Image: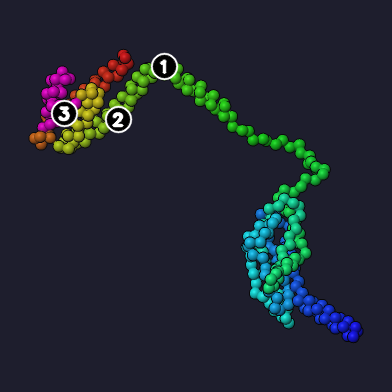
């Protein structure tokens, strides 16, 4: 009887071992790179081979991937052949550890009715790739007796000092010679305006002498009144001929204006238009000289 019981127990033990071998789960995990820089995206492959009927689950984003950080997970369809199922996934992670070698092992879970088991593959190692190569123990220097030009930095204090000196010199010149400089500038400006007026006057005079019509006469008198208004600061363009004659104390100007205005109002040519134009130009030149003299006497 005892032999029968021993034989029965041996049969049960043998069946249990065979069953456990049939239910074995093999896990494999490895990096697809030997080394990586800090923060670089690295693929980690996780495979599980198990018997059909087992409920196997791979880690998801809720799992702690320390010292790595999960970036992306790529899964594949299960492949079953002769009762053995193969599952695989690729985890893209980044390493932010400064350790020269980092190890990593990602588990696979077998889910049962009231419990679960974890299966870990062998740890995969990943070397840290440094951006700067480590210095050798003995530094090697290359002999070089060629003169190397070093770039010179801009001298901002000197630039500021130059600007300060210019500002001080300008202030001193303006304080002692400001009025004189201002007066000379006004004289120079008046000479420039007089030269420009003479060019326009001579052009208008030639046009009017060639073709004495209403437009030419009106342009000539308007040009003369505008410049005289600038020289004397009086409303020449609003005054009548008598008012202009009274201000300039020049009765002959009435005749000059009449010779030109006859073209405007009567459509007739004056007896001596050229002489009238010369007289008006002479009055402008005289007024200009008086203004220059007054500016120099101030």
Residue 276 locus on image (x, y percent)? 16, 27
Q: Position of residue 33 (x, y in %)?
A: 72, 61
Q: Nearer the viewer, residue 38 or 201?
A: 38
Near mark 2 (Cα within 10 A), the count class, few <14, some 14-19 or many ≥20, is few
Disc on the earlier residue, 3 or 2: 2
* Secondary element at tag 1: helix
Residue 250 part of the magenta-drawn span: yes
**Residue drawn at the location 22% of the way across and 31% of the way down:** 223
- Residue at the disc numbered 3: 238
Q: Which residue is mark 1?
A: 175
Query: Dividing the image into 4 quarters, which one contains the N terminus?
Result: bottom right
What residue is shown at x 69% (from left), y 71% (from top)? 114
Find residue 147 and report its horizontal and vertical position in percent.
Answer: 72, 35
Nearer mark to the viewer, of 1 and 2: 1
- Which residue occupies the extreme top position in the image? 297
Q: Which residues are magenta?
A: 235-262
Magenta-colored stretch includes residue 60? no
Mark 3 → mark 2, Cα distance in angstroms: 23 Å
Dividing the picture into quadrants, the one containing residue 78 is bottom right
Q: Is residue 226 left or right of residue 105?
A: left
Q: CA distance from mark 3 to mark 1?
A: 41 Å
216 or 150: which is nearer to us? 150
Relative to 125, residue 6 above or below? below
Can residue 77 be seen in this snapshot?
yes
Furthest residue in direction front, as rendered: 1
Question: Element at badge 2?
Answer: helix
């Amino acid at each position: 009887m005892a032999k029968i019981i021993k034989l029965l127990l041996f049969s049960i033990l043998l069946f249990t071992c065979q069953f456990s071998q049939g239910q074995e789960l093999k896990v494999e995990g490895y990096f697809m790179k030997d080394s990586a820089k800090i923060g670089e995206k690295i693929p980690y492959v996780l495979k599980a081979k198990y018997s059909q009927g087992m409920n196997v689950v791979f880690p998801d984003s809720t799992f702690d991937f320390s010292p790595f950080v999960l970036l992306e997970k790529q899964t594949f369809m299960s492949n079953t052949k002769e009762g053995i199922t193969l599952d695989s996934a690729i985890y893209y992670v980044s390493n932010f550890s400064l350790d020269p070698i980092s190890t990593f092992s990602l588990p696979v879970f077998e889910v049962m009715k009231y419990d679960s088991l974890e299966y870990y593959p062998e740890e995969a190692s990943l070397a840290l790739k440094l951006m700067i190569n480590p210095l050798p123990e003995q530094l090697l220097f290359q002999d070089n007796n060629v003169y190397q030009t070093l770039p010179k930095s801009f001298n901002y204090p000197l630039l500021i000092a130059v600007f300060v000196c210019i500002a001080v010199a300008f202030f001193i010149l303006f304080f002692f010679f400001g009025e004189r400089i201002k007066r000379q500038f006004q004289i120079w400006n008046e000479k420039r305006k007089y030269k420009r007026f003479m060019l326009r006057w001579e052009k208008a005079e030639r046009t009017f002498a060639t073709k004495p019509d209403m437009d030419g006469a009106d342009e000539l008198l308007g040009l003369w009144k505008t410049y005289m208004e600038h020289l004397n600061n009086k409303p020449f363009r609003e005054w009548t001929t008598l008012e202009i004659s009274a201000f300039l104390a020049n009765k002959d100007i009435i005749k000059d204006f009449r010779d030109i205005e006859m073209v405007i109002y009567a459509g007739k040519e004056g007896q001596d238009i050229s002489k009238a134009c010369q007289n008006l130009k002479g009055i402008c030149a005289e007024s200009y000289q008086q203004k220059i003299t007054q500016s120099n006497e101030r």
